[in-house]
């Protein structure tokens, strides 16, 4: 559900300084170790550094009679580890069939989307999942 189309264009919601929502497109990177993203310096990154809460929404672009959606929420952690950045950068560009990064890529922040809650909405049963809303929640005392 998170990567139903190409590289997974999704919508990232952050909290503006005035408490309102800010929603921007983004392409998360799924690995065996977690869900990551490269974030351009700007308002979205400032939001996440000030308030790490996020919501990442995926509309599956279903046919007209099938309204499916997938959403993860939690808090981000910014990573500054060069080995991790290099490893994830290679995967990020390989997934996009790119050889070299674009100008300014090295200035982008590497974040990890720590997942606290997942919502899956299916109109019809699919892949063993029931129709309706399914919620998974992970609570920590961190």
Image (cartoon, rainbow, N blue to C red):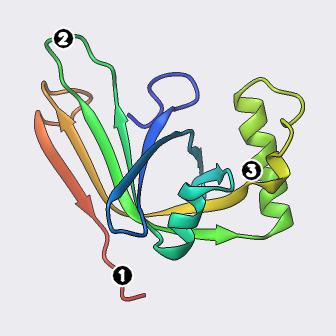
Q: Residues within 10 Å of mark 1 (few under 14, many from 20)?
A: few
Q: Quadrant of the N terminus?
A: top left
Where does the image place residue 69, in percent across and percent down from the top left? 26, 35
Residue 64: give its label: 2
The image shows a total of numbered marks equal to: 3
Is the residue 112 above or below the residue 22 in the image?
Answer: below
Nearer-N-terminus badge (2/3)? 2
Could you tell whether 119 is left or right of 142 in the image?
left
Residue under label 1 = 140
Farthest-out residue, left: 132
Where does the image place residue 79, in percent across and percent down from the top left? 70, 69
- Work out how far the residue at label 1 is from the one at label 3, CA to CA, in angstroms: 26 Å
Residue displayed at 68% across by 50% down: 40
Farthest-out residue, right: 100
Residue under label 3 = 88
- Work out how far the residue at label 2 is from the one at label 3, CA to CA, in angstroms: 36 Å
């Amino acid at each position: 559900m998170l990567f139903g189309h190409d590289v997974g264009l999704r919508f990232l919601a952050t909290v503006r300084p005035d408490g309102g929502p800010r929603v921007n497109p983004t392409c998360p990177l799924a690995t065996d170790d977690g869900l990551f993203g490269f974030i351009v310096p700007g308002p979205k990154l400032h939001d996440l550094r000030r308030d790490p809460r996020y919501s990442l929404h995926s509309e599956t672009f279903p046919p007209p009679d099938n309204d499916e959606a997938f959403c993860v929420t939690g808090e981000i952690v910014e990573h500054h580890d060069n080995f991790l950045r290099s490893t994830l950068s290679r995967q990020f560009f390989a997934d996009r069939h790119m050889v070299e990064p674009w100008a300014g890529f090295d200035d982008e922040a590497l974040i990890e989307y720590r997942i606290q809650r997942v919502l899956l909405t299916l109109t019809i049963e699919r892949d063993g999942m029931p129709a309706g809303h399914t919620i998974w929640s992970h609570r920590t005392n961190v």
